[in-house]
Amino acid sequence: MRLVKIVFLVFALWSSFFVTAQNNGKHTVKKGETVFSIAKQYQITPFDIYRLNPDAKNGIQENTVLLLPQKSTATKQVKEEVTTHVVAPKETLFSLAKKYEVSVADLKEWNPTIAKNGLKIGEEIIVRKDEVVQETGYVEVAAVKSKTETFSYKVLPQETKYGIAKKFNITIEELEKANPQIKESLSEGEILTIKRAVVKEVTKVNDQENFYTVKPQETLFGLSKELNLSQDELIRLNPELQEGLKEGMVLKLPKRVTSSGFTLSNKPLADLTKSVNKSQTKDLVLLLPFGLNKIQSDSTKTQTEILKTNKFLNMTLDFYAGAMMAIDSAKVLGLPVNVKILDIESTKNTSNVASVIAKNDFSTVSAVIGPFQTSHTETAAQLLSKYNTPVISPLSKEVGRMLPNLYYSVPSQKHITQMLFTHFEKNNGNVIAIISAKKGSSKDHISANYPNAKFASYNEKGGLDFEYLRTLFVKGQKNFVVLDSENRGFVLNVTNHLIKLKSEFDLQLAVLELYDTLDFEEIPITNLTELNMLFPSTKKEVNTPEGFIFESKFKKANGVSSNSIVNRGFDVTFDTLLRICQEDGFTITTTKFRTEHVESSFDYTNENGANVNTAGYLLYYDTDLTIKQVQ
């Protein structure tokens, strides 16, 4: 069923001519067409196309189908506004297209000389052409699309029709309709056909709002908790709720998307130890790259020598030690789990993961952790997709193939830096960026995510222009100074100067990540604490009671202190164990809850088909020489 919500936005009338509406809806790109030429053809703006087709900002290809706004008969006046830009050193067509949110093809169309001569420093070029349209009637469409997926499922021991129907969010009648042979009885090992509707996908046409489709048996109270909104706010946005909540209703929600398009999570933080389902034993497999066969066949080195020189093996052993702590903790809690650890032979380009999976029965496995390298994890996920088995990538920051059963547990750098930009926006920050010449990618990243950022300049000798820098600060406003440089002497000089400016301005130092230049031997930690240096991180970096308990237990059991890999091994394994032991299982709980353990948080979100962890921490150095979390 297709539900269409029409929203009328009435503007003041100022017209010069009339344009008759075209109910095009879609346009198939022809060879040589650009976003600008298509917008011109349909008498809409390039922004209209980018709004409905965000990927078009990266360029459009022949035969691509674009969504177009549907408009009623409207009174319009069209004005063209042109934005120009003077080309600076090291700027490229790609960086300019990204900065001004246009395509490279548009830039070439507006500036024919570029195709022949390329970009020239100091040249003034057109970087944006906008048709400003005002009209009497504007129609926006929010289309809710229903999709159905079909797959096979093997009946597990002691499973019932009720349990299977609940697991896949379908009714018993729907299950029996797809599998008539089970009306009388259900047999262990039987292969069933599962047909279910995928979670309804909303095409967000109105940038200011998100939409939510009400599921069966949901209540207003439950929704307010799940969406982290008050009931009053939900009713204010959706007056029809005063007459009651009904299944299938499409609710309007406030915008929770940052300027860069990252969805901010509103999932509740859950303690999954309190909701464990102990009625059924679950199986977990860890695919860890010990490479024991290779070690045993190496007669030239002792095991002690191998441990001293093989960093990858040491990392595997650290992860294993953390995972074993998690398994022990699960047993103490009474979790009904069986854990199998399989050795994987792994190099950068090859692994035996396929043969290991072929030699073992994974049909009843609830989740798999590993291997470590992205390409090998992808292989495991692809091979286990026939069982719909979740495969968790435990250590890699790289997001590879978008497989429905593959989960990337380490947040990417773009996700954690987005926390920083969101914090700037939330505090109405005046952002000043001091970026060295060798850090051009950082400059582009800041420009794309915080367009209002001001950039420091350098004098003829390459030194920072401190007089100009001072003019960028604003009194009565929070000033965030983003610093990125590979030169320790430069960082020391800048931080000393910022400390002097603190008496005049409300300022705070910020970095996109903790990098080696911030070495405390050359940069006094007091410089960073006095400036309350702000930074995003995938790890807590904060001393907590839970962390102290874990550290104490680990040291007692192993005789050495834990490290970040040990902590990671514990967190990923313990989180996975808890999720597979929930009534809903691993996959469903990732859509409902975020979790937090010794050092890491887990908030899995599906972004463009990839299941990624978007949880991180925003931290700062305090004057008492400790690291604290921004509240």
Image (cartoon, grey):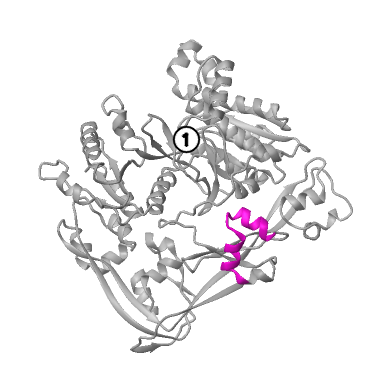
As drawn, which residue projects farthest toward the left?
460
Residue, far bottom? 17
Q: Tell me: 417 left or right of 483.
A: right
Residue 398 located left or right of residue 173 = left
457 up-or-down from 496: above or below: below
- Asked if the stretch drawn in magenta spans residue 131, the answer is no
Of 303 and 137, nearer the camera is 137
Within 10 Å of disc 1 (Cα), the crowding (few <14, some 14-19, many 20+) is many
Q: Amino acid at mark 1?
A: Lys
Residue 142 seen in render: yes
Whether residue 64 is visible, yes or no, is no
Residue 588 image position (x, y, % from top left): 65, 48
Is 412 drawn above or below residue 120 in the view shown?
A: above
Q: What secondary structure is the stretch in magenta mostly built from?
A: helix
**What residue is shown with label 1?**
539
User: Residue 77 at x, y = what percent?
Assistant: 34, 83
Place residue 510 in its image quadrant.
Answer: top left
Residue drawn where x is 70% and y is 41% of the image:
275
* Secondary structure of residue under mark 1: loop
Image-quadrant location for residue 252: bottom right
- Determine whether, in the image, residue 89 is placed left or right of residue 340: left
Q: Which residues are magenta?
A: 219-239
Q: Look at 43% across and 87% down and name the residue there.
A: 20
Coordinates of residue 312 in the picture (x, y in percent): 46, 25
The mark tally for this picture is 1
The percent coordinates of residue 517 (x first, y second) are 29, 32
222 in the magenta segment:
yes
The N terminus appears in which quarter of the rendering? bottom right
Front residue of 125 and 27: 125
Residue at image position (43%, 61%) is 55
Q: Is residue 106 or residue 258 the one in the foreground?
A: 258
